[in-house]
Image (cartoon, grey):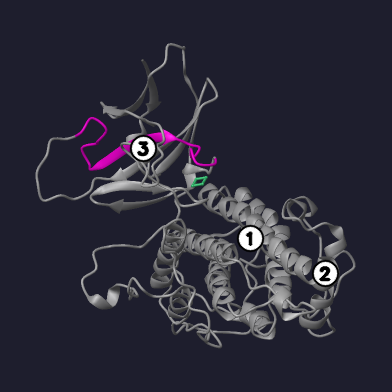
Amino acid sequence: MALIDLGPLTESSHTRYAIHLSNGKRLVLFRLPRIASSESRPMAPNETEDGWIYYAMEAECPHAGGPMTEAHVDIEDSAYVASCPWHAYDFNVETGESSYGIKTCTFPVIVQHGKVSLKIATKENVELSRLEPVSDQVKFKHGPRETAAESPVYLDDNATMCEWCVHILKTSNPEHKIELTTHLFSLFATKEQSPSPMRLGIGVIAPDEPVREEQSKVEPWQIPKAGKGGTLKSRIAMLHALANIEQWAIDLAIDICVRFATFHTMAPSQDLSRELPRTFYYDWLKVANDEAKHFSLLRARLEELGSHFGALPVHHGLWESAAMTAHDLRARISIIALVHEARGLDVNPMTIEKFRKANDMESVDSLNVIHNDEITHVTTGHRWLTWICEQEHTDPVHVFRSNVQRYFKGAVKGPFNAEARAQAGMDKRYYEGLGGHSSKANIIAGG
Ligand code: FES
């Protein structure tokens, strides 16, 4: 049995870590608040005096290798359960058992004298190679809720996916919106593997525009220049602008699920026309869930810097592109995912560099999480445009470029982050020498 010292983690504010061991094994360590119980019980060996409990399990899901570092953690029957982000198999973090009949390995954790250690049954000489904090999924702003108005309204268990989406689009409070969005994704993903997956509820009408809280609204070109990040004021302005985009990005991903739920591919005959597979909805609800996480990270960072979301004026520019493409899923994916979000990939590294130069490493960490997620969002857009084009025997590059020419104002400007774009599936044929129709330039880096 090896006892591996993980160091004095009790001072840390992270709630999960990736553990890399010298024998190549990877584990995930969860740090979770003690579950309140009416019965008094002695402190467990993996518990700290200030009410945190540590659990360790294999970092790779035993089903098909999904990353358990990104698991959703919920409480079920007074126990913590981590659900794999890929197919939502649930694992009790203490026993490793899943309701799907498989089991993952869990490892005893001991907290002693402010240090956390891990017990591994091995005869080898195993050491800790690296311990990496993993960014939290969503930074909720939960404090004690004193009135019902402070809690979001949850739909009942039979609500369909489209009903949930409309409900989220009509939820103006951003805190409620992120809580409902993460709940919807978790519910949809979990039910997907059950005998009764969530009903889609096709036919529900999406609102023209999401409801927003009263906030000073201006046109995109009226937003004051944020500057180069050298001052606190400038960094706050940049984070505020990004948080605004992320809030719209939640709505855009939710909107695509409900607005296009009746979509069918065009085919020479009706029996060859295809509806969207359920994985389409899973993918976009996952994007919405990521955007909720991004908004929460930026909102939390604004507060750490002494400001808050809503302190500065915002624009609704991203929704103009949504309105212009509300009639066609191919156009919607082209403009929102493959122009605006892809533009985000180009500008993110420059933004991150400004924060690094200002030595604001907490913001750099959040922005890195956002950038890496956004590559996967462009991938999602590229994958679904390609899928539609395959069904319709069309060329996705041609479909994309003609949509940009029709529905995008101004030039698709570089410099391009060719590496990140290529990771997402967009080679240069998509964007080189491309411009929209002539009008006022309207480039908005997307969330
Ligand atoms: S890979 Fe984890 S549930 Fe499939």
Of residues 101 and 57, which is closer to you in this image? Answer: 101
2 and 1 marks in contact (CB < 8 Å): no
291 or 257, which is in the foreground? 257
User: Can residue 134 be seen?
Assistant: no
Disc 3/disc 1 C-alpha distance (Å): 31 Å
**Image quadrant assignment for residue 155:** bottom left
- Quarter placement of the N terminus: top left
Q: Report, in whole angstroms, how far the alpha carbon at label 3 lies from the one at label 2.
A: 46 Å
Write down the residue under mark 1. 377
Earlier in the chain: of badge 3 and badge 2, it is 3
At label 1, counting other C-alpha atoms closer than 10 Å, the crowd grade (few under 14, some 14-19, many 20 or more) is many
Dot 3 and dot 1 residues touching (CB under 8 Å) = no
Q: Is residue 107 visible?
A: yes
Q: Where does residue 241 sit, x and y in percent of width and height?
A: 58, 70
**Helix, strand or loop at mark 3:** loop
State the image coordinates of residue 259 (x, y, percent, origin top left): 58, 80
Q: Which span of residues is magenta-colored?
A: 44-64
Q: Which residue is at a point 24% across and 36% down the rendered structure image?
A: 48
Q: Residues within 10 Å of mark 3 (few under 14, many from 20)?
A: some
Residue 393 disc label: 2
What amino acid type should be assigned to the residue bearing mark 2?
His
Q: Position of residue 106 (x, y in %)?
A: 37, 32
| Label located before the other in sequence (3 or 1) | 3
Which picture quadrant has residue 267? bottom right
Q: Secondary structure at mark 1?
A: helix
Binning the other alpha carbons within 10 Å of mark 2 as few (below 14), some (14 to 19) or many (20 upward) gives few
Q: Which residue is mark 3?
A: 96
251 and 241: which one is in front? 251
Left or right of 79 on screen, residue 345? right
Q: Is residue 258 left or right of residue 183?
A: right
Q: Nearer the N terminus, badge 2 or badge 1? A: 1
